[in-house]
Image (cartoon, rainbow, N blue to C red):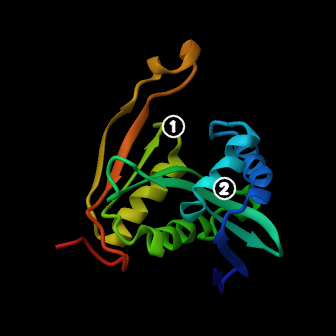
Amino acid sequence: MTLLETNNCVIRKATVQDGRYMWQRVKDSQKLDVNSAYCYIMLSEYFADTCLVAEIDKQIVGFVTSLIRPSNPEVLFVWQIAVSSENQGKGIACSLLRELITSASCAEVRYVETTISPSNTASNRLFRKLAEEMKAPHLESEGFSSHLFPEDVHEDERLIQIGPINQQLGGTHP
């Protein structure tokens, strides 16, 4: 558990009780794909080591869901990250990612991956900033085509890869 001094924010592992609040953060974002509340509860149970929440005054104001790729334990895939609108711009999203990447659960991680739609400027900016802070390459390639989604109502999801990284957030692996 980490306390962000600047805004009295506590970052901790997600629990199943947090699933409903994570769902609400996504719903409120109006930018992220809203999955079932069950999905967030399940992620908090089975991927608790790589799913974190941020709290201010015991209220969930943000979260990150991720997993270490089963086929490659050097890759952390960040699935969703959200911060309540009233708490955006306070560094909470960056702090969630930093805490996650430097956790013992991610000790073997050398690459951070995510997919982001081109119109999600906040997420694009967040992951570029993370790459800069880590002094690591930021690569963008084809991820999931819009044609894969039902009814063609979803943008392409570009694959973002940051790395190789080290856990000190100060540079790349040798």
* Position in image of residue 138 (x %, y %): 30, 55
- Whether the residues at callouts 1 and 2 have beta carbons within 8 Å, the answer is no
Visible residue check, residue 82: no
* Position in image of residue 133 (x %, y %): 38, 71
Q: How many marks?
A: 2
The residue drawn where x is 53% and y is 67% is 94
Q: Which mark is residue 41?
A: none
Amino acid carrying label 2: it is: Glu
166 left or right of 146 in image: left
Visible residue check, residue 142: yes
Q: Residues within 10 Å of mark 1 (few under 14, many from 20)?
A: few
Amino acid carrying label 1: it is: Ser
Taking 57 as reference, is 139 above or below it? Answer: above
Q: Residues within 10 Å of mark 2 (few under 14, many from 20)?
A: some
Question: In which quarter of the view is residue 156 placed?
Answer: top left
Residue depth check, mark 1 versus mark 2: number of the one nearer the observer: 2
Estimate the spatial distance between the alpha carbons at disc 1 and disc 2, rounded to whole Å. Answer: 31 Å
Q: Secondary structure at mark 1?
A: loop
Q: Which mark is residue 119?
A: 1
Question: In which quarter of the view is residue 57 placed?
Answer: bottom right
Taking 2 as reference, is 14 above or below it? Answer: above
The residue drawn where x is 74% and y is 57% is 16
* Position in image of residue 49 (x %, y %): 55, 65
Say which label, 1 or 2, has the lower sequence index: 2
Give the position of the C terminus as an image quadrant.
Answer: bottom left
Which residue occupies the foreground of this view, 48 or 97? 48
Q: Secondary structure at mark 2?
A: helix
The residue drawn where x is 29% and y is 70% is 135
The residue pinned by badge 2 equals: 45
* Position in image of residue 28 (x %, y %): 76, 45
111 left or right of 101 in image: left
